[in-house]
Amino acid sequence: MNYFILLSLFATIVAGKSPRLKFVLHEASRFHFSRPENYVSMYHPEGSDRLYVGGRATLYMLNFTSGGVSNLEITAASDQTAIDTCKAKSSPLELECDNFITVIQKVNDTLLVCGTNAGSPRCWMLVNDSVLTDVQGNGQIGPSSDISPPYPSQRSISLPADGSLYSAMSSVGGQAGSIRRTFGSQKLLKTENVWLLNPQFAGAAIIPSSVKYKEEVYFFFSEINKTARVDEEPYRARIGRICTVDEGGIRALLADSWTTFMKARVMCGAGNTQQQYNNMKQAVVLTAEDKRAGVLYGLFSNAWGRTVICAYSIEDIDKAFSTSKLKGYSSSFSGSRPGTCVRKNSTAGDHADIKNLGVIRYHPEIEDVIRPVGVAPLDLPTDDQITHAVADIVLAVNDEHYSVLYLGTDQGKILKVLHTSEGVFIISQYSLFHNEGPVLNMAIDSQKGHLYVGTAMEVQRLPLADCSRYGDTCRECILSRDPYCGWDRARRRCLPIPPGHNNTTRTLVQNLDHSNSSVCGEAAALKQRRTSPREVMVQSNTSVFLPCPVRSFHATYRWEKDNCVRNYPCLFSGDFCVLGPAVDTPLKNGVFRCMATEDGFKVEVISFRLVNDGRLLAASLVSTLGPSLLLAMATLWLH
Ligand SMILES: *[C@@H]1O[C@H](CO)[C@@H](O)[C@H](O)[C@H]1NC(C)=O
Ligand SMILES: *[C@@H]1O[C@H](CO)[C@@H](O)[C@H](O)[C@H]1NC(C)=O
Ligand SMILES: *[C@@H]1O[C@H](CO)[C@@H](O)[C@H](O)[C@H]1NC(C)=O
Ligand SMILES: *[C@@H]1O[C@H](CO)[C@@H](O)[C@H](O)[C@H]1NC(C)=O
Ligand SMILES: *[C@@H]1O[C@H](CO)[C@@H](O)[C@H](O)[C@H]1NC(C)=O
Ligand SMILES: *[C@@H]1O[C@H](CO)[C@@H](O)[C@H](O)[C@H]1NC(C)=O
Ligand SMILES: *[C@@H]1O[C@H](CO)[C@@H](O)[C@H](O)[C@H]1NC(C)=O
Ligand SMILES: *[C@@H]1O[C@H](CO)[C@@H](O)[C@H](O)[C@H]1NC(C)=O
Ligand SMILES: *[C@@H]1O[C@H](CO)[C@@H](O)[C@H](O)[C@H]1NC(C)=O
């Protein structure tokens, strides 16, 4: 396998913002679909080992255990008449003429499952984890077509909040697109068509408040101006918000519509430069419990399909919505500001309220533009196309909260990223899948510490606290900068921070803000450390390649000969730093040491002693093996 070293010898050079560590996982718990699922919806009850996955005419109920994954499937076929009608009218969408499960959500105690049903959406409830039946209950449910789109390529978002379901439907063809309350005991409401311009939804989140009635739901989407000229940007990224207490307007005005809807423009790009990312593809929000503070991460793309992540402060967004002027409205407000969440108190709406309805109806957009924290997109590797993002907030040993992003790529990889006020640090990259398809969906469980990742072929689970991979020294543990892990001084191991960790005993150490392992106090020991050289016999007329395994991609690797008389750069080849004849190196007798420098310290990784045995390599062997393979085969000993 390591022969590849030779093939791609000159291929790669280490990049600064690359992941620090790269892991290839073979053993992770995984479930393999029996046929590809190109649209994958997920629902994971927090704190459980269960993942519900919606696919084509199938609801998969997966149980993850340490031993593997068990699966129970419920068939949810579409009506034959629906399929026939679908096929008759929509030839380009014929592949979508089936029941794709698009929504799986728990609302109150009802597990609601909706599917496209070949162009005429349907909803069921899942009873006893075994039967899909018609939806019943004391609440009301809107038409299924308001909850699930008719075809899976039309994006929809659903979010349960406070016993109701909120649904956002992207616009397609001549259909307007909407944000609605679709299920629950509260009044079912909708957006006015003029409020949204061909919206394509990217996500939704509850913004909690210490006062219940001030709770809001944010929706993230892009609007498309279909009449924009070719030289104009057709996309505009947006945040829309509504209050959960909203019960609609009066008979004459906004009777079945939101009375608290407002929207704002979101920018992602460096300052006012041309390089803007206007198409918001996905969004996630991290909030601290009961607090209106937190961060929004938006996944954006530009016209060339390049993806970036921008981060926004929820406090900034909140402030914009509560102080900005409204577009096209210059008069003063009477009574409370339009769009403010207020408890329904007086039964007869007073005059000021009615005036505010008019303001909302005709001027729902604020003038202020929402800009990212740190002004520009996060500094992430550019060679990865990000297809999906989830985030977690982690309480570290120093009692501070740290944000961790998990970014799925089009190659089926996951980047684990620490985001602090200083910027991003890419902790690691996981290669998870047998088939390198794009990551289609993810679900995160902060409570149990799991990440679920789905592609069209597989679903996998991996631990958020993956501390044992970082190695068994304090330095390696600290330099990982993984907020889930700390070095246990007493047990001398890299361990997950236990929930409710009490920092007064100071047994666990971390240093998340900088790559600096001075807390370990190992500096002196590191300088002394030597590896014992592996002896290699060389025939005098063969070329030699010395492999050094790369662990940290943030370290610099050099080869030194005979105690640093001379040193040589190396060639990167996959996960090896190789010293070879190509760099004009006298690879003859002597000791060659591979040194890695990171965090100001030089550490010896591996060493070889080359011994010229004076013989010449037999031609027959050379012709069968090729001369340079000989040392490469030495790499096989390393593993
Ligand atoms: C999965 O787990 C649930 C609850 O732990 C259990 O009721 C169910 O029988 C399990 N299903 C399978 C397929 O193992
Ligand atoms: C669900 O289980 C309960 C209790 O076992 C049973 O009474 C009920 O009939 C089941 N419902 C369905 C739809 O199977
Ligand atoms: C949700 O539960 C609450 C309290 O248990 C109840 O009042 C409400 O009617 C339920 N909503 C639905 C839609 O069933
Ligand atoms: C869409 O673009 C056209 C052409 O620039 C412009 O005239 C129109 O006002 C835009 N529509 C909206 C809603 O911004
Ligand atoms: C209605 O508002 C009045 C005055 O603001 C307050 O005293 C009263 O408690 C409120 N009623 C309810 C049901 O919240
Ligand atoms: C321990 O936590 C407290 C807050 O609970 C914090 O003020 C203190 O700085 C922490 N101590 C250390 C050593 O990080
Ligand atoms: C942490 O441990 C110390 C000593 O054991 C104790 O006095 C303190 O109350 C604990 N703090 C918390 C937040 O549990
Ligand atoms: C690491 O931190 C220590 C103590 O804060 C400091 O003296 C040292 O210069 C830092 N090392 C690097 C490489 O920044
Ligand atoms: C090494 O020398 C031997 C003897 O002269 C010769 O047969 C063989 O082809 C040489 N190998 C290489 C790689 O030049």
Image: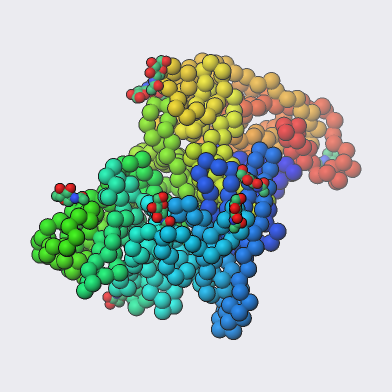
Q: Quadrant of the N terminus?
A: top right
| Outermost residue toward the right in this view | 620
Residue 466: x and y in percent read 56, 35
628 left or right of 169?
Answer: right
| Outermost residue toward the bottom in this view | 88
The image quarter in which residue 335 lies: bottom left
In this rendering, the answer to whether 570 lies above or below 229 is above
Query: Front-most of 152 and 385?
Result: 152
- Residue plotted at (61% across, 71% down): 78
245 left or right of 633?
Answer: left
Residue 293: x and y in percent read 31, 43
- Residue plotted at (42% across, 30% down): 396
Residue 129: x and y in percent read 60, 53
Residue 338: x and y in percent read 19, 60
For residue 444, say whether it is visible: yes
Query: Front-most of 570 and 300?
Result: 300
For residue 313, say whether it is visible: no
In this rendering, the answer to whether 118 lies above or below 510 is below
Q: Quadrant of the C terminus?
A: top right
- Residue plotted at (59% across, 18% down): 529
- Residue plotted at (50% across, 63% down): 135
The image quarter in which residue 211 lies: top left
The image quarter in which residue 612 lies: top right
Query: Front-most of 234 and 96?
Result: 96
531 left or right of 146?
Answer: right
